[in-house]
Amino acid sequence: MNKNNIFITIKKELRSVFRDKKTIIMILAFPLMIGVLIFLYGFMDTEMVGDDNNKYKVGINYTPTEVEQVYIKEMQLETKEYHSDEALKEAYDNGELEAYILKENDTYTIYIDDSDMTATTVGTLVESYLSSYNKYLGDLYLYQNNIDPEVVYDNIQIEFKNVDGEETSSTALMLTMVMGIAFSYIIISISLATINMATSAIATEKENGTLETILTLPITTNELIIGKYLATVIIGLCSSIMGFIITLVSIKIASLKFEIYKEFTMNFPTIALGVLICFVASCLIAGLAIAATSSSKSYKEAQAAGQTLEIISMIPMFIQVLDVNTTTYFYFIPILSHTTILMDLYSNNINYMNLLYTIISTIIYTVIILKFLLTKFKSEKVLFQS
């Protein structure tokens, strides 16, 4: 086998990709969505829990007690008292308020626009303030009747733990979900990049009739396919590494602003192993992309065939969102294993046997796919459009 022919094929395929600006933008731009996603979740989490530097304006038709004022301040609310309900409603309609409360006897009615995210958050904060005040009134009644509130209320304790029995928190659970989606996006980016490359390398050349011309040159079918395969691996790896770097850098920067990312940690071993997983995933998915598009006679057919692989690569994201319990079998399932092991790496939950299962199984699957491709492309029906 002539290594020079393989190298020339790789250069040719990569050159064709980098000459097409639309293709390279599509291949490399998708990972940028990961960074956007990370910051978006950070802002959403901040909106949900409230921001110490942000005050939400709420109108009321009563004078809050000193105790109420304490709870109002804790919830980052800024209340303004109106002497008539009409003036209160008018101020809300004019956009001066994000919510308002009408009190009649002991009933507090909260008015918000439930189609607005900020208003919904304000409504939650107002409800928390009133719940805290309600508990205070209950405690006061118990003290006045010589009853210890702890005996009444402290009947249960709440803790957060993961499936391995380790202590965690609601913030950690949110971080796990965000990382699961981000790492799934990295694997999806490999699928998108390799499918585009495989379509260009095989289907487009078959459609244009250039594949037959290439094979009249002093190059064997095996050299040609291996060259195209390695070029596809390189494109997939570039896309995944870019997504991987964007993920780590985005979370690190976001941790300076958003509380949700404070518990995120990384070090050299986890970064190195993450790059290794991106590499083996690119090797496998590149082979699957070529296999999926190899029987197509045109660019459109290849794109349609590649959509199946794109859909499969999205499955791990839904599994992470649904919080399905991980089992050892996950580490033998192609594509799913890569997302799962990346999650383990950055959740401080790594089992090196599972890492070994993922790498070895991926190598075995890749070798099988390569042998299949080399055998398949010996057929003229596959090589040339009939």
Image: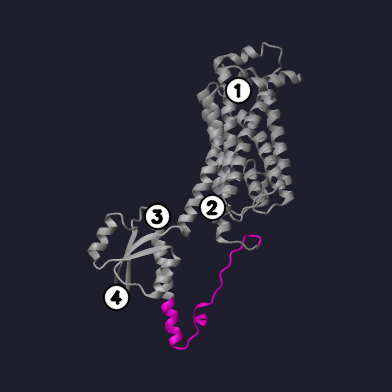
Q: Quadrant of the C terminus?
A: top right
Tell me which amino acid carries mark 3. Answer: Thr
Tell me which amino acid carries mark 4. Answer: Asn
Q: Is 118 in front, or is 360? A: 118
Tell me which amino acid carries mark 2. Answer: Lys
Judged from this view, the residue extending furthest toward the right is 1
Residue 276 screen position, x and y as percent: 70, 40
Tell me which amino acid carries mark 1. Answer: Ala
Q: Does residue 146 show up magenta in the picture?
A: yes
Q: Name the residue under label 2.
A: 257
Please tell me how crowded label 1 is: few (under 14), some (14-19), or many (20+) other residues with Cα within 10 Å: many
Q: Which of marks 3 and 2 is nearer the N terminus?
A: 3
Answer yes or no: do the residues labelled 3 and 2 have beta carbons within 8 Å?
no
Q: Name the residue under label 4.
A: 105
Query: Rounded to the nearest whole Å, what is the CA distance between mark 3 and mark 2?
Result: 19 Å
Q: Is 163 in front, or is 144? A: 144
User: Which label was assigned to residue 201?
Assistant: 1
Q: Name the residue under label 3.
A: 118
Q: Is 326 in front, or is 192? A: 192
* 232 up-or-down from 182: above or below: above
Please tell me how crowded label 4 is: few (under 14), some (14-19), or many (20+) other residues with Cα within 10 Å: few
Q: Give the range drawn in magenta.
A: 136-164
